[in-house]
Amino acid sequence: MSDGAGSDPVDRALLQVMMQSEASACGLYLLAADEPVLQLTVMSGMPLRMLEPWRRVALAAPIPVAVAMRRKDLVWAADHQQLARDFPRTSVAVPYEFALAAAPIDDGAGCLGSLLLLWPAGHAPQLSPAEREAVENGCRRLASVLRTSPLAGGSAAPAGAPRVLSPPPVRTVDPQEALAAVDFVERLPGGGCALDLEGRVTMVTSGAAELLGTRVEDLVGSRPWEVLPWLRDPVFEDRYRSAVISRRTMSFVAHRPPDRWLTFRLYPDGRGLSVWILPSDGEHGPAATPAEDEAVPVQAGQIYHVLHLAAALTEAVGARDVVDLVADQIVPAFGAQGMLMYAAEAGRLRTIGHRGYPAQAVAAFEGVALSAAHSPAVHALATGEPSFYSSPEEIERDYPGLPRLTGKAARAVLPLIVSGRPVGCCILAFTRPRTFSPEERQVLTSLAGLIAQALDRARLYDTKQQLAHDLQAGLLPHRLPTVPGLAVAARYLPSTRGMDIGGDFYDLIRLDEGTVAAVIGDVQGHNAAAAALMGQARTAVHAHASAGAPPGEVLARTNRLLTDLDPDLFTSCLYVHIDVRTHRACVASAGHPPPLLRLADRPTTVVDVPPGLLLGIDPQARYLATEIALPPESVLALYTDGLVETPGVDLERSVAQLAERLDAAPRLGPDRLADTLLESRHADADRQDDVALMVLSAERVGPKGACRAGRA
């Protein structure tokens, strides 16, 4: 992290949009080069610690900057009530009054990142036209600068901590005026001090030091609640955080042992806070004197960080999500330098994630039996109680050699237990000795319970996903047969919702040396029942096609079978009989989207096929076939509706758009052509339906035979 006044072109553009929109704080998020993550790169107007939970934001996360980029539209929250309604996870971690806007930074070729802006409490319910114009113009300037600035290296977020920019001072003063200002504040009753945005004291009067009961030099450069034990209550830090975010004047009364009460008033702006301290006139009753020990207190920032993590854990899907959340948020929240996460499997501990540990330390405890001795994680799981070690000596006493092996001087060992059953263990480690206060131990213990439940749920989900993946892989063809004169590529993308399994299927059936059948279909639903019916439909089509039935009859026989099964699910299907020698194809459809045909010398067209009735409805349904030419260098694309269906868009229009994409695609082989057609669906973070695609490209072959659209 580096402070600056904005000498870089990106910095200047960011400070300019902050000034023109009259925002109190801003942040620039850029898309990482090699992962779908937004990284905080430059910021101004608020402490970096307050944005710690959002240093790295997954593109799919329900966080304003990510939502703005996904939607390619401005996101607005006028107050905390709206933020809680639209972005509950964010509101839990920042429970203050302010207004927020997030806007995508798009240069026309794609989104580079997002701009975050905050306004003080009391903003109007909507952005004014001038503010909105300032935000939009700022995003355009940032997009233009980012394409050429070394800050972004082109378009990707650079590694490292964000840059923190300091707004310019209100005015400059000469030494004589500065001395006069000091004399002025020293003559006022009580005392005052100045804090930067990070909460560190930058100036303090002698009157303030006397009231606080300490020396000026002990305060400058430190945070008051870290130096003065009686200010360690999270409430006091919370007032500071609230003043910085809301830009509202805050006050509180604190008890200075043994018998003094002091009133603090906080006056914030974009560069820091002015704090005035006076003896309190009110009677506030007796107060207990806190113990003078070395314990590290639970701070307000830690509490809100933990609340943010608790909200995030409810959204974690797989075990990897849980590990990443703990590593990216819990580790920095408590100032830890290392993390180990174990899962209990078959009587042993298996490492599922780690940060900040040398490889030999991770390997030393991999697969250790739950009955083994001399393992902190095993001991914690055996007793069900967390262990806290404040120094290397304490660790060495119980586990000789462990401090030298790990390079860590303190640790919290948290057993992960659900309903009395061990799920795993989480270890937070520190490179320096530190004491865990009773409050901090309580917070970490409660957090371990949340992590345990999330990990147990995530591992169950991972097991189901693996089962679904194996089932899907077993039902779809492992490989497609080689057919001289025909190049074929097939793709399948599962839905991003529900189980990773669906009813979309495809097949390529080699009938004889010169004929082949291409099949694609879609069973209603995304569950095991849909997958089972898909397997039956695919088997039936394969059997009837191999028996030599013409396309319409293949669908009719399959329909009768599915109707007899009465699965309460419907199936669409497209069957194409191809004679590679005559370059002819016969197509029959059971309510399936029509295929696309691209010829070498003509625009891509949508093949006009009688749609027919969905399979499994009427046992007497009949299906008509359409014959088309499939000359060399032509391409036939078969697909399921997941590739073309878009909410609010007419299906025919979507099919026409897919035809346009196929027509505009370079003359590539089927594999690259299939990937090109799927590009938009690969990038879809919320794909609500499965996608199956087959691309068939006709090639020149030897002597031609007769068209056999009927019996093979």
Image: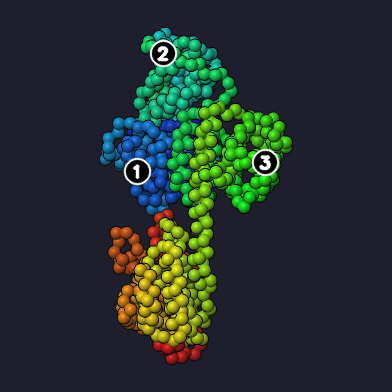
Mark 3 or mark 1, earlier in chain? 1
Query: Is mark 2 in CB contact (under 8 Å) with mark 1?
Result: no
Q: Residue reaching furthest front?
A: 420
Using the image as rendered, state which of residue 303 and residue 670 is in the foreground.
303
Question: x%, y% of residue 560?
Answer: 36, 79
- Disc 1 residue type (three-letter): Asp
- Label 3: state its secondary structure: loop
Of tags 2 and 1, which is closer to the observer?
2
Mark 2 or mark 3, earlier in chain? 2
The reply to whether residue 606 is visible in this rendering is no
Instruction: Provide the residue designation for mark 2.
Output: 285
Mark-to-mark CA distance, 2 and 3: 49 Å
Number of labelled discs? 3
- Disc 3 residue type (three-letter): Ser
Q: Residue at x 44, y 49 (%)?
A: 59
Mark-to-mark CA distance, 2 and 1: 42 Å
Q: Residue at x 40, y 72 (%)?
A: 521
Numbered tag placed on residue 300 in the rendering: none
Mark 2 or mark 1, earlier in chain? 1
- Label 2: state its secondary structure: loop
Of tags 3 and 1, which is closer to the observer?
3
The reply to whether residue 529 is visible in this rendering is yes
- Disc 2 residue type (three-letter): Gly
- Crowding at label 1, few (<14), some or many (≥20) Cα neighbours within 10 Å? some
Whether residue 174 is situated above or below residue 514 in the rendered picture: above
Instruction: Provide the residue designation for mark 1.
Output: 86
Question: x%, y% of residue 151?
Answer: 50, 43
Whether residue 165 is situated above or below residue 340 in the rendered picture: above
Instruction: Provide the residue designation for mark 3.
Output: 375
Q: Which image quarter holds the C terminus?
A: bottom left
